[in-house]
Image (cartoon, rainbow, N blue to C red):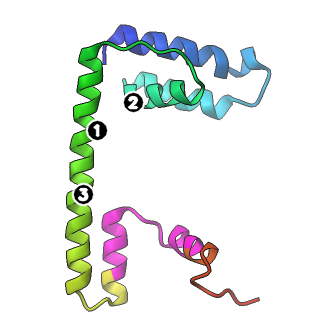
Amino acid sequence: MKKEELKKMHRQLARITHPDLTQEDTEEEFKKIQQAYDEGDGPTLLKESIKRQLNVEISDQTFNSMKESLDSRRRGIITKQNTLQWMWCQSDKSYKTRKKMHEIMGISRKEFNLWLRNRGKIKTSK
C-alpha cells in the first residue's frame, strides 16, 4: 500500500479515535490504529475505515496487491484446514493429539472450552 494512502486513512481514523478529540474512551482503538500505521498494516487501517464507514480511496495497484495477499492467506488456511482434517481422521484422537492440533491452529484451550460451554457441549458443575 502506498504511503500516501496509509497516511490519509490514518489521519481520518486518528481524527475520530483520538481520545483528546473525541472526549470518549477511545484510547485502545487509537493505539490499535497507530500501531497499524507504524507497521504499515494497510489491511487493518482499511478494515477500521470501513467499520467506521469512512470514504477511502485506494489505487487499483493497492487493491490488487491486497487481494492477492488475502487470496494467498486464504489458500494457506485452506491447506492447513485440509491437512488438519486428514490428521484428525487418521489420529487416535488422544489428548496429546488434540493439544497439538490446537497448538497448530493457535487455539487457546481455555477459550476453546469456554466456546464449548457456551454452545452447551460441556456441562459445568455448580
Q: How many marks?
A: 3
Q: Amino acid at mark 2?
A: Pro
**Tag 3 secondary structure:** helix
Q: Amino acid at mark 1?
A: Leu
According to the image, label 2 marks what residue?
Answer: 43
- Give the residues drawn in magenta, as a range: 98-115
Secondary structure mainly formed by the magenta segment: helix
Calculate the distance from the C-alpha at mark 2 to the C-alpha at mark 3.
Answer: 20 Å
According to the image, label 1 marks what residue?
Answer: 70
Residue found at x 33% / y 85%: 96
Task: State the mark number for residue 78.
Answer: 3
Q: Quadrant of residue 79?
A: bottom left
Q: Is residue 90 positioned above or below 11 on the image?
A: below
Nearer the observer, 39 or 126 = 126
Horizontally, residue 21 falls left or right of residue 68, namely: right
- State which quarter of the image contains the N terminus: top left
In front: mark 2 or mark 3?
Answer: 3
Q: Residues within 10 Å of mark 2 (few under 14, many from 20)?
A: some
Question: Sequence-wise, which precedes: disc 3 or disc 1?
Answer: 1
Tell me if residue 24 can be seen: yes
**Tag 1 secondary structure:** helix
Residue found at x 75% / y 31%: 25
**Tag 2 secondary structure:** helix
Residue 64 in percent (x, y) is at 24, 24
Nearer the observer, 77 or 41 = 77
Asked whether disc 2 touches disc 1, contact meaning CB atoms under 8 Å apart, the reply is yes
Calculate the distance from the C-alpha at mark 3 to the C-alpha at mark 1.
Answer: 12 Å
Residue found at x 64% / y 88%: 123
Residue 114 in percent (x, y) is at 59, 72
Question: Sequence-wise, which precedes: disc 2 or disc 1?
Answer: 2
Q: Residues within 10 Å of mark 3 (few under 14, many from 20)?
A: few
Q: Residues within 10 Å of mark 1 (few under 14, many from 20)?
A: few
